[in-house]
Image (cartoon, rainbow, N blue to C red):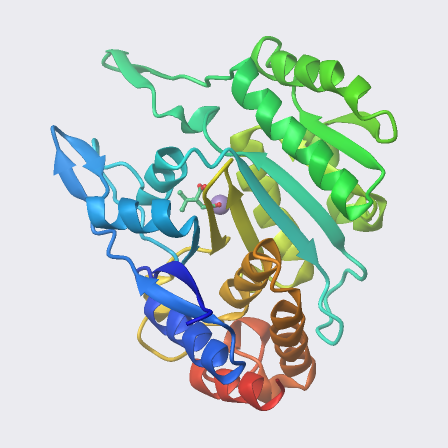
Amino acid sequence: NGKYTVSFIEGDGIGVEISDAVKQIYSAADVPIEWESCDVTPLFINGKTTLPQQAVDSINKNLVALKGPLATPVGKGHQSLNLTLRRTFNLFANVRPCKSIQGYKTPYENVDTVLIRENTEGEYSGIEHTIVPGVVQSIKLITKVASERCIRYAFEYARSVGRKEVLVVHKASIMKLSDGLFVKTAEELASEYPEIKLSFELLDNTSLKLCTDPSDYKSLVMVMPNLYGDIMSDLSSGLIGGLGLTPSGNMGDKVSIFEAVHGSAPDIAGKNLANPTALLLSSCMMLRHMSLNSYADKIENSVLKTIASGPEHRTKDLKGTSSTSNFTEQVIKNL
Ligand code: IPM
Ligand code: MN
């Protein structure tokens, strides 16, 4: 039928409402996509969080998925499903762009950062022990293989979008071995990308400089280990108006999963208050990845226009008075 099939993980909490907004807008925009709904309610096999085979098969078949937020379970042995997905499909680079929205004023103007986060290891390896009561260990695992494929992705990304610099954000002054290996791996790759400048900055300094003058980061691509990327992407979101606005793509060699940076926000779930922008912009990254650029432009322009059109069309997180459903209607009108 000339349509692409994409796996859709609607998610928990506000996931239901924002996924519904995406579906309505996609059908109004005549995007040639058929959604294949994926239930990822985990199974616990031998104490391990395991994805239902049907969901794994769907994503392996379609190669592209859009994902709403999934709640992170508390307690030992219950691994985050978000991490399980990243690991299952070997999604080694997490691309997190963050761009000021014209027409939504914050103390910062012209933020235009791209952060690429190593997505499979570091403090997220899940290797933790109690040695004796009161003494614990959480291992930060860094490998050359994972560092290299992520940093290479950053170089390739910079090349493809015409950014002239890759900035490695690290703390090798203290994490001498782990971050040291990350830094060294970047240095070794640099000769393959002679037209791109490679530079380095300490994480604490980047934090300071990003919230002093983010315009210094406009023409480069940041790349960093997993946990730093987690933290710095929230910081970046804060500069432009919060987590309701920032998209991401979890990229692997074959599969990619696009998702909002925010969580499932159980406090506002089911109240028609959630902002679907982050998931919508993630879906636009997805459309561009699928070379459906004209649909991406159409939806993105309409979302940005809606936000810029005033507080009556913005959700509460953006100091507006609009509900999720009113916002969605307005985006459809502006298509
Ligand atoms: C993110 C989220 C996840 C993370 C959580 C939900 C496991 O905060 O995508 O940034 O820590 O990576
Ligand atoms: Mn995070």
Residue 136, percent from left and from top: 32, 16
Dividing the picture into quadrants, the one containing residue 185 is top right
Quadrant field for ligand 1: top left
Q: Nearer the viewer, residue 208 or 48?
A: 48
In the rendered image of this protein, does residue 29 appear above or below residue 149? below
Residue ID at (49%, 79%): 25
In the displayed structure, does residue 140 sit left or right of residue 290? left
Q: Nearer the viewer, residue 18 or 105?
A: 18
Farthest residue in the left direction?
A: 46
Q: Is residue 323 above or below residue 63?
A: below
The quadrant in which the N terminus is found is bottom left
Residue at 53% x, 31% y is: 226
- Identify the residue at image location x=54%, y=49%: 249
* Viewer can see residue 174: no
Locate residue 110: give its quadrant: bottom right
Q: Position of residue 201 (x, y in %)?
A: 76, 27
Dividing the image into 4 quarters, which one contains the C terminus?
Answer: bottom right
Q: Residue at x 73, y 71 (%)?
A: 105
Say whether residue 275 is left or right of residue 171. left
- Left or right of 220, for residue 25: left
Q: Position of residue 220 (x, y in %)?
A: 80, 41
Q: Is residue 20 left or right of residue 92?
A: left
Query: Would residue 320 be seen by someone viewing this image from the given angle?
Result: yes
Residue lying at the far front of the rendered structure: 1
Residue 152: x %, y % from top left: 66, 28
